[in-house]
Amino acid sequence: FKEQLKTEEGRAVGLEYFHSRGLEDATIEKYGLGWAPSSRHALTDAAKAAGYKDEYLLETGLCAAYDSDNSLRDRFYDRVVFPIHSVSGRVIAFGARTLKSKEAGKPYAKYVNSKESDIYVKNRSLYGIWFAKNEMARKDKCYLVEGYLDVLSMHQLGITNVVASSGTALTEGQIDLIKRFTQNVTIMYDGDPAGVHAALRGIDMFLREGMNVKVVLIPDGDDPDSYSRKHSLAEVEEFLAGAEMDFVDFKSSLLMKDTAKDPLKRAEVINDIADTIADIPDAVKRSVYVDFLSDKFEIRRDILDERIGVTRSKRLIEEKKNTDRERRQAQAASVAEPVEATDAAPVAEPAEATEEPVRRTGLDALIDNRIMATAERDLLNFILTYGTSKLEFQSDSDFYPGSDEEALTVFDFISQALEGDDSRFANTAFRKAYEAYSKDYYEGYSQEEIVKHLMDGEDRDVAYVAAQLSTDERYELSVKHLRQSMMSKGSWLTIYVPKAILVFQQSRMENKDSELKEQLQEAQTASDSDRVMEIMQEMLKVQKALKLVKVRLGREK
């Protein structure tokens, strides 16, 4: 697509459009913007000539099949193209915009996006994250906007800690991605009804995840793209600093309109804001906001406390039901075939299933998903012990980056592997520890400083995980093991870090297989034959992927 932008058609249509939107050539090049030719077979023909199979082109969503003869055609044609990057910088998908106007009686889609694939999951991807992550960590703040051009125009202006939700409604997975780099987010949406609705929904979601959220609504019918093009960097920064509203002020200014003479509507607004405060997990923050709301509306604090307490109780009961259901699923899965142990890898054995419930202590008490626990613990141990150490792969290794490339650290290697598979930690405490480490790592702290921050932090689960896994003797590289293997620490890491990732992938496949088995049972009980077939096909894919991982681990031939 980048190369097609340089063709006569690409320059005349695609490049002209980008320039008309105020984008400079440097921005176009940096973000890899492109052009999909008007021919419906340009990409298909080029891909086939390069040896790509039809199956691959269909599965990645680059091509679609005609219903008549099943021949392939391009999914993206006659459109400007916006590549979507993963957090590690790989292109994982595309968004393509038509430049034509809607014609009566004809189908019209302003944007066409890549379908989901093994490397692209929409609800866990953010447009611009690769270019924004370092500045998000450095400034400890993220601006969340709606569209591709909003990101591009703000970045070009000089505000680079900005991402967009890639044409989807905000999801928990996207919030988790932002949390890896900062706890502070400013929602920056249009001031129209759709933008206001999206901002209200986003506030509740960010607060539930323990984040600090503010809102900016762009005035006078503008959006972040047009506003950025009309003003200088200093003017936009001044506007943002003055227009940012706390969620209480935002909701009250929005919802209190025309309620002065209607006490019932006023009460509804106060209850709505109190319910939003109930989403905040941190007790101190909740208390501060209760004081603020009490003063703002001149209502007794004890009344607000009662409302918030009732709301939180209802939500906690619902969460407990969900947690209990997940635990039952995990316990049922724990009696499945255990992961085979190998003598070669210093990886802990999964705990044996027991008939009688036992009291869980230590790290075991923090585990939500027992299938994933051992593999996640191993990866975290490598991160918390050797995270900033370099992995010096030999030139004959599959992971050798090349003579011109700098060696990856243990954390970079693990994080890129997880992002490449679009994976995340299933156990909450382990995931929070990983995210906390990631945030400090990208801010440039040393290994010792990062671990100390985690151990001294407010989240006691994270602190306990850090204390246990940065000093756990079961996982440390012992002198005895070094003598037996005759390896340096660096050589040892180049063998066992990749192996730990494979074990993680195996556990992930086994976890998915367990989930599908339960779904299959439910579908069979409901006599839903279509759903049964769909699940069985998915199980075959998972089991095939699981076998491949086991072969790579030497656990199957």
Image: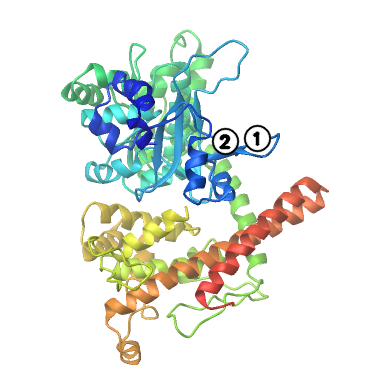
Name the secondary structure under disc 1.
loop
Name the secondary structure under disc 2.
strand
- Label 1 sits on residue: 66
Q: Relative to the observer, which residue lies in front, 77 or 200?
A: 77
> What colouring style does the render use?
rainbow
The C terminus - image quarter: bottom right
Residue sitting farthest toward the right: 527
Give residue 338's position: percent from left, percent from top: 61, 75
Q: Is residue 37 above or below residue 406?
A: above
Amino acid found under the numbered disc labelled 2: Arg
Give residue 106's position: percent from left, percent from top: 61, 16
Q: Quadrant of residue 419?
A: bottom left
- Is the Cβ of the residue at disc 1 closer than 8 Å to that at disc 2? yes
Amino acid found under the numbered disc labelled 1: Tyr
Label 2: how many Cα within 10 Å (few below 14, some 14–19, many 20+): many
Q: Is residue 524 above or below residue 382?
A: above
Q: Relative to the observer, which residue lies in front, 176 or 396?
A: 396
- Label 2 sits on residue: 73
Label 1: how many Cα within 10 Å (few below 14, some 14–19, many 20+): few
Give residue 446's position: percent from left, percent from top: 20, 62
Q: Relative to the observer, which residue lies in front, 440 or 36?
A: 36
